[in-house]
Every structure is written in structure tokens, then in C-alpha cells.
Image: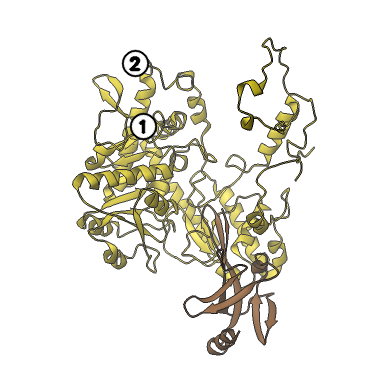
Chain colours: A yellow, B brown
Amino acid sequence: MVEYNELIFEMSRQGRIGSSLPESDVDKVDLHDKLPAHLIRDMPAELPEVSELQLIRHYTALSNKNHGIDNGFYPLGSCTMKYNPKINEDVARFEGFSRIHPYQPVETVQGALKLLHELQEDLAEVTGMDAVTLQPSAGAQGEWTGLMMVKAYFEQKGEKRIKVLVPDSAHGTNPASATVAGFKTVTIPSNEDGLVDLAELKKHVGHDTAALMLTNPNTLGLFEKDIVDIAKVVHEAGGLLYYDGANANAILGKTTPGNMGFDIVHLNLHKTFTTPHGGGGPGAGPVGVKEKLIPYLPVPRIEKENDQYVLNSHHPLSIGRVKGYYGNFGILVRAYTYIRTMGPVGLRQVSESAVLHANYLRKKLEPYFESPYSQYCKHEFVLSGSRQKKLGVRTLDMAKRLLDFGYHPPTIYFPLNVEECMMIEPTETESKETMDAFAEAMIQIAKEVEENPDVVLEAPHTTIIGRLDEVQAARQPILRYSKEE
Amino acid sequence: MNKLKASVSNEGKFPRIDANLSGGCGLAVNLSIIFDEPRRHDIILENKGVQIRIDHFTKRYLNEEIHIDYTDEQGFLLGEHFESGPCTIEMT
């Protein structure tokens, strides 16, 4: 088999083209007559000149080198790398969905609006919220949207609340979103069981608290059993409770953030609802709210008036539009398809299996790695590489070694409150055989650390490129190609 | 160096330059001086009578020259250039 390891720029040959165009029948234009001199390049752009076949082989070879859920186990904790059913893709490609335009009159896209409206209602039911917006195009944008609604809510009430509380196990996006939305963040430490320390929370909650951002189960995979008391403390101080839906895969159909006392929820459709994980998009981060926050939802809102679906922008307290058009429609179609395919019973089975799988794998691996929290986990769990650290091998080394077995490593060094952390999320879509094989690989690596550490320290051995020098990449990044370099 | 020597005798543990990672979506390497027990295959540097340990993992993140300083306010400082973000290599 031929390996295509050249950059496409290196394959370039002067004059080679990938398509044949007819002779231009437009007179040549002198750019200097049309553009200011400083906007005209001195040298031609170094665009690769390749044939169509070279192009196809190059990008097909690159795609084959990629690791995705379709070709291997991907237990990246907190990211919920579960299988994306292909029926989602079939439906998203229906002409009625894929060939419509956002500028069409609403009466010509009633089917699409009906789908969006029903998805809003489904997500409201799943989260226990009263209304949902589908506009935000990612989880983090959903967080920001939710926090802007919090801000608008308190401004309308005439209250100055500047603080957002986040536990130390929170996703990094939580404090980042709060900061971007103009709040000051306060970190609440976890207790020895890995849960929110209620006494510490009480110390920090006050009249200036706007919200507590929490994911439940938390990033350690543990259910915040004091959630009712936590909600009470925050609400009694006049604050709101924000649910980061990153871990909703663990509670689907079993309970809802609404039941737990949350006021706002964002969901990551690429996690819980099997839309593709994009490297930067397109994505979707719908936000659900309780009734008191409905006036602040982004506009336009998709509403039903008599038998017609409409886009209503007449909501004067709205925070405004947060995304062009109405969200990433194709992604929303995929999530809708998944919900319809699974049904209520299927969605409940998702969380039951996700939790069962995580506990099965946790039990298999606990004898070989430190397990900082011994209670039952939800959909994911954390292990610590502290035992191996004493033997001179780190979690990063073991993660690299896992590549030799064909697995994507777990999330590592997060959450920050666990030394040499590995956060493992097998998801409900993996088989027992896959989890057993992964466990065997992890156990073999733990044994190698004791008996033959060099094989771990020098890993990976089977990848096209061996151990990358991330220090040089950080210190001397080369971010663009040029022939001179 | 005097502070390092004093710490060794007080703590009964060995000084070590240690790389700790914190991650999530990116990766940050934090270098620090700690006092702990020997690890397998430690590299031992000796300077003015003080032994400083480095494990193989940490060695990847060190340049040939590394400066150690101490202030009462900040404790031990470690870095290539203290002026520009000592102790951390950000990789995101």
C-alpha cells in the first residue's frame, strides 16, 4: 500500500490542474487598473497544483489516518464519543431539509419549522424546562446565551449581581463563559467525596450571587446527591441555578435538571443526542429555561399560532439574536431523528447502559490504578496515574501507549483536582467485548510500567509519526507552510 | 541553594524539579520545585552540595539551562525567563 505522507504543497507540479475549464471569453483585466497597489500580491499564491486523482487520494489517505468513533473506541471522558447513527445522516439529506433556504417565506418551510418546534418541545420535556431555544451553535455559546439571560433577568429586576459560582471540577468553559458574559467567577472547592462542599457553598453565596453553574453528574462522574440542598441555598439567596448539560447522557429519561431545581440548561447535541462532533462546527447548544426566564430567550422564537408555525421577533425583553438564522438546521434534524428513533424507552435505556458500562469498566481497572473515589459512578469515572508516577511513568506516557493498541486515550489531566487524572467514558454504544479489550490493554500497560517501562515511555511505536515533541511545538510553532521553510 | 539545603534537612525528603500537567481541551505544563521521595530512574543533578532530582518525564520539558530562585513571598521559582511567565509552558 502506498503511504501518502507528503503535504499537498509538496506534491505540487507547475501547470498541473485538477479540472479543465473552457477558454475564457472575458477580456483580461489588469488588476492595477482595478485595485490599489498595496492590495495586489507581489508573488503568486503558492496554491498546490495537483490532478483531481492526486487530490482525492491525498484527502482519502488523510481521512484514513484519522481516528473517529466509526473506526475505533474513543473513551474520551466528558466528551461522550458515542456512535452517531447513520439514519440521522439519511434524514438530514432529505431534499425537503437539505435544499431549503433560510430566506424562504415561512409558509413554504412549515415542515422544517414544525420539526424545530417539536424538537424544542422534546428537549424541554427531557430537561424539565418550560421553553427552549435552538439558536446557539455550540455548548459554550449555549452557556454564554444562558448567562446573558441571567444578566438580563437581574437587570430587569433592578438587582446588581456580579458573581457566578463554579465548582473546582467544572468544565473550563463555565468560568470562561461567565467571564465573557461580564461576571466575576468564584470557585467552590469539592469535598473529600468529590462533590460540592455545601459548607463552602454557603460561605460564598450571597446577595451578589447571580448563578451557580453545575453539571450533574459532575466531571468526576459522581452524582451531586445534595443537589436539592444546593438549589435551596442558591435560590434562597436570590440566585439562579445553571445546568451544564455536558453530562446529560447519564440522566436521560431518569430525572431532569428541572426536577433537581435548575432554572437554565444548555445541552450539547453532539454529546447526548448523537450529532457529529465537529472540529469547530457546525454544532448546536440549545438552551432551556424555566418560565420566569422565557421573556429573555433569543429571537426570533419558533412559535405555533393556530395551525401555522411562525418566527416571532416581538419579544421586547429578549437578549436578541445569538446566531444567524435559527441555528444549525442540519444538526437539529439529526438530533430530532435520534430522539424519534429512540423514543422515551430508548432514551431511558441510553442512560442506564451508559452508567452500567462505566461502572463495569471502572471495576475492571480499579485493581491496577488508583481510584480516588470509590463510590458508584454515573456515565464516566476518573482514575489516577499516581501509582505509576512513583515508578517514573506518567499518565501522558500511558495515553501515548494506548495509541499502539488502536484506542483513542481517555481525557487526561482533567478534572484538575485529581493527580495524573484519566477520565474514562465508555458510552452506552460500546459492546462488552470492546470494553473488555480496552481493559486488557490498560492492564497490560500497567504491567509494562512495572516490568518494562521503556516501552511505555517511548510510545507510541505503531503510529505513522512517533512521539511528538510538544515542547518544541509550543516553543517554536510553525503554523504555515512556505517553500523557503 | 541555602534554602534548598535547609529544606532537605527539615523535611527529610529530596528536592525535585517536577512537571505537572493540567489539561482538558489544551495542555499546560507547570514546572515547580517539590520535596518528595525518589522515583524509579530519577536523574540526579548536584549543585553546591545539593542533589536535585528530575524524572524522565520532566526532563522532556526542561531546556539545558534552568534557573532556580527563591523569594519569601513566592517560595521557589523555576523558569527560563522569570519575566515572561515562569514555570509554565502552555500547549493549547
The answer to the question of whether label 1 and label 2 lie on touching residues, with beta carbons closer than 8 A, is no
Secondary element at image label 2: helix
- Closest to the observer, A130 or B5: B5
Residue under label 2, please give it. A107
Task: Name the outermost residue toward the top.
Answer: A25
- Above or below residue A283? Residue B31 is below
Res B79 label: none
- Foreground: disc 1 or disc 2: 2
Amino acid identity at mark 1: Leu
Q: Please state the horizontal and vertical placement of residue A97, each as a whole percent of the image.
A: 45, 22
Q: Chain of mark 2?
A: A
Q: Residues within 10 Å of mark 2 (few under 14, many from 20)?
A: few
Which image quarter holds the N terminus of chain A? top right
- Above or below residue A58? Residue A363 is below
* Side of B16 relative to A271 (left or right): right
Discs 1, 2: same chain: yes
- Closest to the observer, B37 or A470: A470
* Side of A242 relative to A89 (left or right): left
Q: Please state the horizontal and vertical placement of residue A42, each as a whole percent of the image.
A: 70, 33
Amino acid identity at mark 2: Glu
- Disc nearer the start of the sequence (1/2): 2
Residue under the image location 23 percent in, 57 percent down: A232
Secondary element at image label 1: helix
| Quarter of the view holding residue A56 | top right
* Side of B35 relative to A200 (left or right): right
Q: CA distance from mark 1 to mark 2?
A: 19 Å
Q: Please state the horizontal and vertical placement of residue A32, each as a whole percent of the image.
A: 65, 23
Residue under label 1, please give it. A119
Q: Please state the horizontal and vertical placement of residue A299, each as a whole percent of the image.
A: 32, 32
Residue under the image location 37 percent in, 16 percent down: A105
Residue under the image location 39 percent in, 66 percent down: A193
For the question of whether residue A250 can be seen, the reply is no
